[in-house]
Image: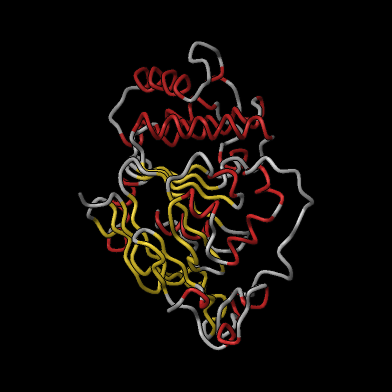
Amino acid sequence: MEPLLQVHNLSVHYEVRRSHPVRVLSDISFDLASGDAVGLLGESGSGKTTLSLALLRLLPKTARVAKGAIIFRGTNLLESDERELQRIRGAGISLVHQEPGLVLNPVLRVGDQIAEVLRAHRDLSARKAWAMVKKLLAQVGLDGDSNIDAAFPHQLSGGQRQRVVIAQAIACGPALLIADEPTTALDAAVQLEILALLRDLQARLRLGLILITHDPAVLLSTAQRILVMYAGRIVEDGPAHQVLHQPAHPFTKALLQCRSAASLQGAQTRFTAIPDEPPNLAALPAGCAFAPRCPERMDVCDSRRPVETHLERARRVWCCKHER
């Protein structure tokens, strides 16, 4: 079967200065099948959110796609006009933002905001749309018989607001859900609830899921496959259990040594951090972008970028030490 989503050699530049475009994404390639969950893992500034916006053609005006293809259900979204994209956004691909307080309109009741999504894609009366709002709120764990649909966003907790945003995202039955750091602003208990909800919806609705995070522990029970990003490139790609427990790339290893990943083994360890600063995307080194921070650095790492190496059939890494 043809994958639900295929991304081929996607590169995105920001035109900060016309003569010196900043390469925010470089040669991103991956596939996603219907019903599968992929985790997108990386530190802040690695290009994760830019990738999510590129998939929906929602990049800012200063950004441009330099090359590549984004094939969704056989259609190259980079060749689609705005009318076709409006039909796909929300009904084919939906996005759950990391900060629901910034997404929800503060002066509209949350039920109206969900109904607005429904009526944008379906020919529904106000009465039918409101009935579906009740069902959607119940589907995301908010009592459909309560008055929560009549509440304003500021009257809800952070977890409730995130559930409302998820209800908006699944309202029109999309095939692909992109969740961009959906647990960042929530406490630990609510984070677990939201992740459990995403797992349940993905399995029940057969959603393709792209879960974006900087925390490896978030992906432990959610993703079947993980793509690790650094400086706008994928540096490791493989089954989740292998990437999390047998990392191949030094950057992945460094992430797993940070305190956020200690919960993978239930260990109590001192906080560790990756040394130095993330690279400046406007002035990347000639060789491997992670080399200045890498404890396994070799001379070749400074002179050229690593090439794709297949460790196994379903596992790839971009690191000079693995090249044969």
- The image shows residue 47, relative to residue 284, as above or below, that is above
- Position in image of residue 159 (x %, y %): 61, 30
- The foreground one among 152 and 144 is 144
The residue most toward the right is 270
The residue most toward the left is 1
- Position in image of residue 272 (x %, y %): 75, 57
- Position in image of residue 5 (x %, y %): 31, 53
- Position in image of residue 88 (x %, y %): 32, 46
| Residue depicted at x 48% and y 25% | 140
- Location of the C terminus by quadrant is bottom left
- The image shows residue 25, relative to residue 301, as above or below, that is above
- The image shows residue 191, relative to residue 135, as above or below, that is below
- The foreground one among 161 and 243 is 243
| Rendered image quadrant of residue 208 | top left
| Residue depicted at x 67% and y 78% | 292
| Residue depicted at x 48% and y 22% | 137
Q: How are the colours assigned in the image?
A: secondary structure
Q: Is residue 5 left or right of residue 145?
A: left
**Count of numbered badges drawn on the protein:** 0
| Residue depicted at x 52% and y 15% | 143
